[in-house]
Structures are given as structure tokens and as C-alpha cells.
Amino acid sequence: MNTTPANDGAPNGQDDAVSDGSSKRESGVSGVHEAPSLGARIEAALAASARSEAALADISRTTKFLNATIGTLRTSNAVLAHELQSLTQIVASVERVGLAGRVDLLGRVISEASQDYARERARLVAEHDEFITMLVADHDREVASMQRRVVELENKVQQHDIAEDPFALRPRGQGN
């Protein structure tokens, strides 16, 4: 079975003349730096992917924490409602005199507890949304930076390939 090096671009069977495995192009002493290898580019992409995965894991942990907090608030609200029902039953056994005032007081306490719950939930959701927005913005900046770097590297590789090939087509107004 005849195998070829992954970077020489020769199809199977055409590399018989090159027995030492060297590449067809060799970098001259022209001062041109070689572009990062495919392996280096892949490692950079994997590192960026790992950072993104860590950010998403942070988002997931935060979401779980917020869900647990909201669940705790719901439980507290249920306990408070139960206690208020117990107090209502106690008040029911008390004389009718003053009962209306006490029921009104309990209704206000329930209303305030519900309002507190709604405000706390809205605050937690707003903080959660802000946190996720910040993480997404950081991720978008990182991706944009990596995309710019890839374009720069591709331009450098393209310029390097054109500089090495004296017969390459060049835009008008550039020498030859």
C-alpha cells in the first residue's frame, strides 16, 4: 500500500519519485516566515473551543443556581401561604368583633409577600439575563478576533505562495 504525506498534495502513486518524504517546496532564505502549520491552527481552534465550552459551563451552572434560588423562593412563598392560612384559621375562631380588621391585615401581608416574591424573581431574572449577555458578548468578541486572525493568516499564506511562484498571476500594476 502506497501512502503519501498529508501536506504534499500528491495523489497516491505520484510520489514514487520523491522517496525521502521531503516536501516539494522548501522555504528559501528570503526572510519570509512560514505560516503556522495546520496543526497549530487546529490547536488554536481547540483552545478557543475549550474556552467557549468553559463559558457555556459557567452559564449552565449559573442557570442551575438561579433555578434553585427561584425554587427556594417558591417553597418559602408556599410555607408563608400555609402559615397565613393557619393564622386565618386561628382568626376564624376568634370573636367576630375585630375579625374583619385582622383578615384585612392578613390579606395585606399576603399581598406584600406576593409582591416581594415578584420583585425578587424579576431581579434574579434580570441579573441572569445580564450575565448571559456579557458571556455571549465576550464569546462574540473572541470569535471575531479569531476570525480576523484567520483572515490575516490566510492572507499571509496567499502572499507567501504568490511570492514563491514567479509565474503566478498578479494584479495589474504590480511588476511582471
Image (tube, grey):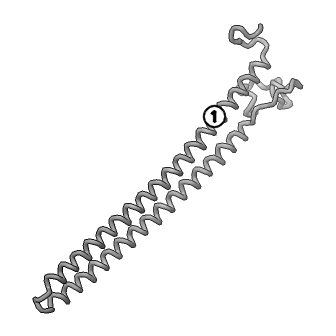
Q: Quadrant of residue 142?
A: top right
Where is residue 167 shown, x and y percent of the image?
76, 11
At 83% from the left edge and 31% from the top edge, which residue is drawn? 21
Where is residue 117 shown, x and y percent of the image?
34, 69
At 15% from the left edge and 91% from the top edge, which residue is drawn? 93
Q: Nearer the viewer, residue 145 or 53?
A: 145
Q: Nearer the viewer, residue 39 or 35?
A: 35
At 20% from the left edge and 89% from the top edge, which residue is drawn? 90
* 152 left or right of 64 in image: right
Query: In this rendering, does residue 2 appear at all?
Result: no
* 108 left or right of 72 in image: left
Q: Quadrant of residue 42?
A: top right
Where is residue 118 shown, x and y percent of the image?
33, 65
Q: Nearer the viewer, residue 11 or 148?
A: 148
Q: What's the residue type where badge 1 is placed?
A: Arg
At 55% from the left edge and 43% from the top edge, which residue is drawn? 140
Task: Read off the residue under disc 1.
Answer: 148
Picture layout, residue 176 above or below residue 72? above
Judged from the image, the secondary structure of the residue bearing numbered disc 1 is helix
Picture layout, residue 116 above or below residue 17? below
Query: In this rendering, does residue 130 appear at all?
Result: yes
Q: Quadrant of residue 110?
A: bottom left
